[in-house]
């Protein structure tokens, strides 16, 4: 599975109609939709599709034709996202009608092609499930531990300083297992 970390857009034209496809992280959906409606007030349609993983690692999907004939825009756009194994990603296609009707098949192709074009020209990242780990160490071991965390590309979510230091970490299971095998006796996993 793959995802995007930032917004990308591409313009696709078909028989004088203009399709502006925006691909972005699904968590920004409301913000991007509001911005695009302000930027393109004369556009006929703001079709969307998104896919994301919920807290149970289930894929949640949704799409809208936004006034286009049923099943000709939102669902084909969603199918392209699914076919490219994109998750935690959304696409909004802004359409300006060019005066020539495309028909249902033409609409399906145009929306699918616009989403394929923006995906092709986007930077995609491989999705890895992240897990959390909490560890406790003495102050004297903190700098070496932080160095090891940096080398392993393990995220430090938070640090708590008391009589010792508690670190809240996040990384893939594999990286956390490598870290655990390197930890000294004085470092405790919680």
Image (tube, grey):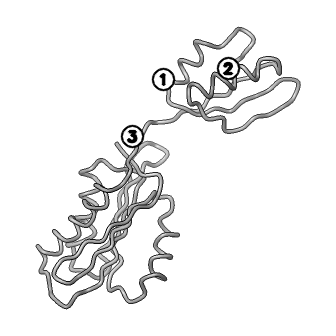
- In the picture, residue 133 is in which quadrant? top right
Residue at 13%, 75% in the rendered image: 106
Of tags 1 and 2, the one toward the viewer is 1
Of tags 2 and 3, the one toward the viewer is 3
Looking at the picture, how far across and down is residue 130, in whole percent? Answer: 51, 35
Residue at 35%, 58% in the rendered image: 61
Looking at the picture, how far across and down is residue 125, in whole percent? Answer: 40, 44
The residue carrying mark 3 is 126
Mark 1 and mark 2: Cα distance apart in space: 16 Å
Looking at the picture, how far across and down is residue 96, in whole percent? Answer: 30, 84
Mark 3 and mark 1: Cα distance apart in space: 15 Å
Name the outermost residue toward the top: 185
Q: Please tell me which of labels 2 and 3 falls first in the chain.
A: 3
Identify which residue, 129 or 113, lies in the foreground.
Answer: 113
Element on which disc 3 rests? strand
The residue carrying mark 2 is 189
Q: Quadrant of the C terminus?
A: top right
Q: Is residue 100 left or right of residue 149?
A: left
Element on which disc 1 rests? helix
Mark 2 and mark 3: Cα distance apart in space: 28 Å
In the drawing, what numbered circle is on residue 174?
1
Is the Cβ of the residue at disc 2 closer than 8 Å to that at disc 3? no
Residue at 44%, 36% in the rendered image: 128
């Amino acid at each position: 599975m793959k995802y995007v970390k930032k917004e990308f857009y591409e313009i696709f034209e078909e028989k004088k109609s203009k399709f502006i496809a925006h691909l972005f992280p699904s968590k920004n959906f409301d913000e991007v939709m509001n911005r695009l409606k302000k930027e393109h007030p004369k556009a006929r349609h703001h079709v969307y599709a998104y896919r994301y993983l919920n807290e149970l690692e289930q894929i949640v999907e949704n799409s809208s034709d936004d006034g286009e004939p049923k099943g000709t825009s939102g669902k084909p756009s969603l199918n392209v996202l699914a076919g490219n194994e994109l998750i935690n990603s959304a696409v909004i296609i802004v359409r300006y009608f060019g005066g020539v009707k495309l028909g249902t098949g033409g609409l399906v192709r145009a929306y699918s092609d616009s989403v394929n074009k923006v995906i092709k020209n986007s930077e995609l990242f491989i999705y890895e499930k992240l897990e959390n780990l909490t560890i406790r160490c003495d102050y004297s071991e903190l700098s070496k531990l932080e160095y090891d965390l940096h080398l392993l590309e393990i995220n430090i979510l938070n640090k708590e300083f008391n009589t010792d230091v508690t670190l809240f970490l996040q990384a893939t299971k594999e990286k956390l297992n490598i870290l655990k095998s390197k930890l000294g006796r004085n470092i405790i996993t919680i």
